[in-house]
Amino acid sequence: MSYLKLFLTFFKIGAVSFGGGYGMISLIREEVLSNGWLEEEDLLNMIAVSESTPGPIAVNMATFIGSKQGGITGSMVATLGVILPSFIIILLIAALIRNLLKYKGVQGFLNGVRPCIIGLILATALNIFITTILNISTLSDFGNDYSGFNIRGFIILIMIIAISLITKYILQKKSSPIMMIIISAILGMIVYSV
Amino acid sequence: MKKYLNLFLTMLKIGLFTFGGGYAMIALLENEFVSTKKWIKKDEFLDMVAIAESTPGPIAINAATYIGYTVLGFWGALTATVAVCIPSFTIIYIISLFFDAFLSLTLVAYAFKGIQVCVIYLIFTAGMKLLKKMEKNPFNISILIIVVAAMVLTSLFAVNFSTVYYILIFGATGIFDYLISLIRSRKEADR
């Protein structure tokens, strides 16, 4: 495992992912899956852990993957990689171009990027649904060895949606991500034990 | 020196208590730096938020670097950024050492199978929240539909097409759209 690869991958993630938190997940997913650093399930576990612990998702992810790939040095290298682009870009803006956002060209760029980020987030959710619940990774392996629809996962998803709708419309309360994670953990223990 | 220590400890505290990412942190930062310490003016803080949201990278890191620089220059930026990362770095590093052993317990593994499903729901609702706030004009809607369709199809047909390209392509489209509107308004002004 080369530290340089870890550093460069997380540097790229830090440098080009707009929209913070969930906006960064599509690129993080693509990079960690294609490098074989995590399986889809590990990635989802990590997102849940990130949601339930303090700090930015990207930093949490970098620390975790760095640690798995290269111990304490790996986790430092990866975390440094994901932070450095922000640090450099923000320093340049704060020191030199505070009115960056007032340029019409920059506004144009962001106008195009914003709906794109929303699309990336929704598509990432759909793609994870397709790979983990429908259990289809690509269409080509659909015919050969289709290992089957993830019925338990689907039941849990329906229950989560039902619970969030009940909290929102009947109890008139907001459901926090951490609350939903705890409920789904309980659902998982019940549905998979049966 | 005392101000550096103050900045360091405040950012450490914020890094430790911010659950749910960048947006949750903005409120804490405002409370500390604008209301309590009065190190930053309200309008400058709002500019900072706009920049932190519009530049790449984690919003929390962007905000910490910007505030650190505004208060104490380069070394302030470094102090603030390092401090805000230390809590999550430490916590996640410790978790990474024990996570696999923890997951090998059957009941925990079952719990995480439920949690994995929940994460799909969380990502989707995060996207839907942004979608609700998005201005529904033809430009935005067409970009959104193209991105979702292309992402799902490339994944299904196992085509490699990096997320980075989507961002660059539609960023360029945005600039192009601005240039066209500029040319149009010039032409109308000529008439």
Image (spheres, coloured by chain):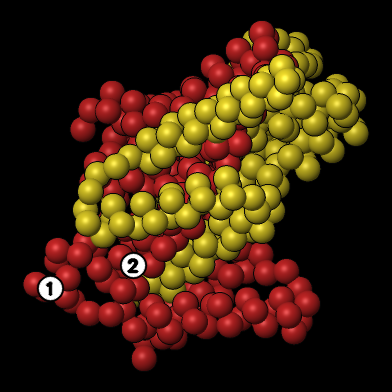
Chain colours: A red, B yellow
Residue B21 in the image, given as x and y percentages of width and height: 61, 46
Quadrant containing the N terminus of chain A is top left
- Count up the numbered dots: 2
Left or right for A124, reference A107: left
For label 2, the residue is: A130
Q: Amino acid at mark 1?
A: Gly
Give the quadrant of residue A13. Answer: top left
- The chain to which mark 1 is attached is A
Nearest the eye: B171 or A127 = B171
Q: Is residue B124 above or below residue A73?
A: below
Q: Nearer the viewer, residue B129 or B148?
A: B148
**Disc 2: CA contacts within 10 A as few (<14), some (14-19) or many (>=20):** some
Mark before the other along the chain sequence, 1 or 2: 2
Decide: is A84 above or below A120.
Answer: above
Q: List x then y, in percent, for residue B14.
A: 70, 38
Residue B10 spot, x, y in % from top left = 74, 31
- Pick whichever, B29 or B128, lies toward us: B128
What amino acid is found at the position of numbered circle 2 in the picture?
A: Ile
Which residue does the numbered mark 1 point to in the structure image? A143
Height in image: A118 above or below A164?
A: above
- Tell me if A134 is positioned left or right of B140 in this view: left
The image position of residue B55, as x and y in percent, is 59, 29
* Chain identifier of the residue bearing label 2 in the image: A
Q: Residue at x 31, y 74 (%)?
A: A134
Instruction: Residue at the far left: name it.
Output: A144
Which type of secondary structure does the marked residue at label 2 adopt? helix
Quadrant housing residue A98:
top right
Q: Quadrant of residue A86?
A: top right
Look at the numbered disc 1 and give the secondary structure of its residue.
helix
Q: Which residue does the image show at 59% across and 50% down from the upper left?
A: B138
Q: Is residue A84 at least partly visible in the picture?
A: yes
Could you tell me which residue is drawn at 27 percent across and 28 percent down? A5
